[in-house]
Amino acid sequence: MNAAIEVTKLEKRYGAVRAVDGIDFEVHAGEVFAFLGPNGAGKTTTVEILEGIRPGSSGQVRVLGKDPWVHGRELQRLIGVIPQDFHFFPKLSPREAIDLYAALFGVSASARNLLQRVELDDKADAMFDTLSGGQKQKLGLALALVNDPKVCFLDEPTTGLDPRARRAIWSVIRSLKAEGRTVFLTTHYLEEAQLLADRIAIINLGKIIATGTPGDIIHTYGRPERLRIDGDPRMVDRLQREVGLPVLLEDGAVAVEIRGKGDAVKVLNWLDTSGFAYSSFRTSQDTLEDVFLRLVGSSDQATLELSPEGDVT
Amino acid sequence: MNPTRIRAYFIAFAKGYLRNPIGLFFTLVFPIILILIFGAVFSNTGSSAVALYVENLDHGSAASVAFLSALNSTGAVQVDVVSVPAGSSFPSYLGTQGYSAGLIIPAGFEADLANKTPVDIPVYTNPSAASQAGIALGAVAGVESAFNLKLAGGSTVLSSTQYNVGSQIFTYIDYLIPGLIGFSILTSPMFSMVNISSTWKRDKLFRQLSLTPLTRSEWLTAAMVWYVLLAILAAFVMIFVGRSVFGAHVSVVAWMFPFLVAGPVLFVSLGLVAGSVSRTPETAAVVGNVILFPMMFLSGTFFPVSSFPPYLQTVAHVLPLYYVIDGLNAGILFNNTAGALRDLLVVVGVAVVLFVLAVRVFSWRER
């Protein structure tokens, strides 16, 4: 598989601070790659180095085979970027902004189509400073697409947006992938990464601590699947002795670690004959959120937003 | 440098500027307000007449009226006939009203003139307003001499006409117009560039532009073209207002255009340097004002530098705006090509240095 982005031993130092501390990863052409981490983990620094806005201190970065700091001018025609907290000229309308970008890139782009695509056509002639946060972000997305980019960098595109605007942006990201573009998405919303990304890298304190598909990461770093029984907690010792599987109490329920259907049948058969009272049972598995918390949660700077639906600006 | 990109960005920049009423106000409206205020306040000072209060005890006789209108027509005094309240004397009346000059036309003035009987006209002046007293006494003595000459049947041999220094008759407003054109050349690029270079950095707008093919030099070219056009527009508007409202003796001359180009280039660069070296928009505003305000007042904008005390003149001579205004004066008022050229060389030299400096300190990318 050919790589759209290759990063090898990348470091970014500010004095004694290592914002990015020797990271390696590869983004395949045509995939959505989520770069996940708590605030201050080094996400934006990394994405800005990939965009050619900042130089790295050491290591190697290639975007579509080119060094972004050296070949920024050639690359900017091939990439689309929405920065975190996108701002534009306050007294220009979305339509004018797109026309300006089209003229600067020397391409013909239909402002109407692009604005329809990001669901901003009703605000085509409103001044930028009158747009809401979500509408501004949508314009940022539309501008990132003016030059028909091969690789899109979206730096926390939905931070601070209400659920509707967030979903609109998600659907655009899905369509980018469907068109065969590579998407590099940084986010601190776990749900967003799990829903959109083909592969994920988790960065914390400037280091990548896990890479893979969401399933891989849960499988590698998550706990085994558990059968949870809401019933008499006194069964724990006997259950462990007689079935031979690890058992613990989890949030008041009896949880048995199982490795497949056979284990579950064994436990339920035992339960049926043991005489212990129980009301219900179900299996449970770690989510990306559980894994993420286990990986970075110990660090006191991990300021995660676990429930993006909950905050509305 | 790609002309299509410069043009596209220029249009966007101009729209942004025209849609912001504050920028337009400071560029076009504010200087006009200044012309109107300064013009109204100062345009009469050169010929401002001394108020001369008169108690006419000859009760409006034809001879007394002729005498007073002769006084008025000297232009040195403005006669104001008053009636003194009963129980008050004329001098004490002048004192209580705070008037500094007055005279009494005695009763029987007309009859005495007809009989050629000597008449004493008492003139009262306030010693603490010596120059006004001098003007009033001089005017009265002059009119008396004219009357005496006429009564004696003599004829005028010597006479004079008044002219101002310079090739034309200049009034304060004539000097004010080039000064305010300079004011406009200074303020709109400086205010905008200090603001743009600091707030755009904060809002990451330069970062945004750096992700497009637009280059820094294209950006700078578009901005400078805009401020040059704005300066030319401001110059035309001010010359028009000065001429039409105050009858100023200024007109559009070829020599003002080099200054209308080099001036904005200089101050766009200076504003960029001031904004770029500041970390926040707030410090940038302070740095900008520290540069802007002394320059605004000490470069001959509102008052000729030659009227400053010597140490302030020295200060004025290191301010680049002084050379812009001096050059505009030389071009517009005095048709002094050599003087304008000398000033232009200074302005272009400083503009080149600041431009190079601005290109060095003004960066779009971050480290």
Image (cartoon, rainbow, N blue to C red):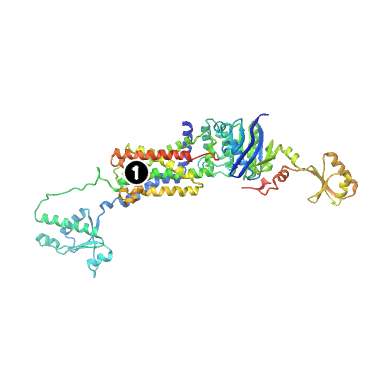
Q: Nearer the viewer, residue A7 or B204?
A: A7
Q: Quadrant of residue B51?
A: bottom left
Q: Nearer the viewer, residue B115 or B135?
A: B135
Most extreme residue toward the front, as rendered? Answer: A16
SS category of the residue bearing label 1: helix
Q: Nearer the viewer, residue A271 or A79?
A: A79
On screen, A148 above or below B334? above
Q: Position of residue B303 (x, y in %)?
A: 33, 49
Question: Does residue A226 appear left or right of residue B244 in this picture?
Answer: right
Q: Position of residue A231 (x, y in %)?
A: 84, 50
How many numbered marks does the figure carry?
A: 1
Q: Is residue A291 visible?
A: yes
Name the residue carrying label 1: B325
Few, some or many residues within 10 Å of mark 1 (<14, 14–19, 20+): many
Q: Quadrant of the N terminus of chain A?
A: top right
Most extreme residue toward the bottom, as rendered? Answer: B87
Q: Position of residue B300 (x, y in %)?
A: 34, 47
Q: Is residue B229 visible?
A: no
Q: Quadrant of residue B63?
A: bottom left
Question: Does residue B114 appear left or right of residue B238 in this picture?
Answer: left
Dot 1: chain letter? B
Q: Position of residue B205 (x, y in %)?
A: 53, 41
On screen, A253 above or below A72? below
On screen, A176 above or below A303? above
Question: Does residue B225 appear left or right of residue B247 in this picture?
Answer: right
- Hey, what amino acid is under mark 1? Ile
